[in-house]
Image (spheres, helix red, strand yellow):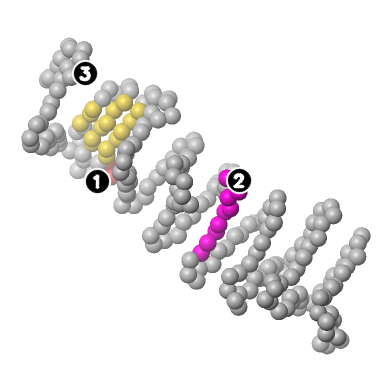
Amino acid sequence: IISATGTGNDAISIDATAGSMVIGASLANEKTLKLGPVSATQMVFSPSATPGSEKISLINTSGTDAKSLQFYSTVGSIDIEAGVNLALSGSHLMLTGSGTGNNAVQIHSDGGGIDIDSMGGPIKIASAPNHGIELKSNGDGDITMDSDDTMTFRSDSHMKYFTDLNSGQIFIGCNVVNGAISLGLGGVRTIAIATGSNASSVYIGSQDALVVSSSAVDVHIDAAGTDTDAVKINSAGG
């Protein structure tokens, strides 16, 4: 037992000025090496003959500060890697990046997918003012958004759906047999369905009946073309 009654910062000092230092190299299985008081801050090394019981614990028992357990690197990076699962849990989980680049906070998977799931509340993705949110799939991958209830897309300014491919298409469909797709607005607003300046046609079709109606205002079908069939309404069967 090594003990000291001194009150200085180096009441007990163990140092190696040239070689290495080894502490607990022969610590037996099922025994522990403890640093720090049990009721405050403590690191515990617990070797075991059973792999599932071999652990290293770093515990702050009573600290309430926002940084009661801190991993900090002044210049370099911090790498935390797990062979199976990396579990982060808490009453509030926050990832903060102090950088100013577009990838200040990056969640990346080298091989598999990324699953973001909430069992009790909503999932909110928000950006700072004058900054957008981009959902992007590289290569030939798809982006799928699915909801068992209602899916709402809202914008205080403009909402655009477009494809960068010259021959690309945008499909808005409903897989339910008796389902419907409604495009509607409250108040005095306009819904415009059109193509860009280099596009050719706009197709609106249905395998059953196609109904265009309005209960309170007029319905306008306009074309800027000068041909005799600038606006064409055709029936292939009846």
Residue 31 in picture, x, y percent from top left? 19, 33
What secondary structure prevails in the magenta region?
Answer: loop
Picture quadrant of residue 18: top left
> What residue type is disc 3 on?
Asn
| Residue nearer the viewer, 110 or 169 | 169
> Which residue, given by chain and number where applicable, does mark 2 sit on?
129
Tell me the tag on residue 9.
Answer: 3
Which residue type carries mark 1?
Answer: Pro
Q: Which residues are magenta?
A: 128-137
Front: mark 2 or 3? 2
Q: Is residue 151 left or right of residue 219?
A: left
Q: Residue furthest front?
A: 226
Judge the density around disc 3: few (<14), some (14-19), many (≥20) Cα neighbours within 10 Å: few
For the residue labelled by badge 2, is the local secondary structure a helix, a strand or a loop?
A: loop
Q: CA distance from mark 1 to mark 2?
A: 50 Å
Q: Residues within 10 Å of mark 1 (few under 14, many from 20)?
A: few
Residues at circles 1 and 2 in contact by the CB criterion of under 8 Å: no
- Please tell me which of labels 2 and 3 falls first in the chain: 3
- Between 63 and 100, the residue placed more toward the observer is 100
**Picture residue at 55% right of the left edge, 57% below the top:** 134
Q: Is residue 214 above or below residue 131?
A: below
Rendered location of residue 145, percent (x, y)? 59, 60
- The picture places residue 151, in percent across and down from the top left corner, at 67, 56
Residue under numbered circle 1: 51
Q: Is residue 133 magenta?
A: yes
Judge whether 17 appears above or below 142 on screen: above
Mark 1 / mark 2, whichever is N-terminal: 1
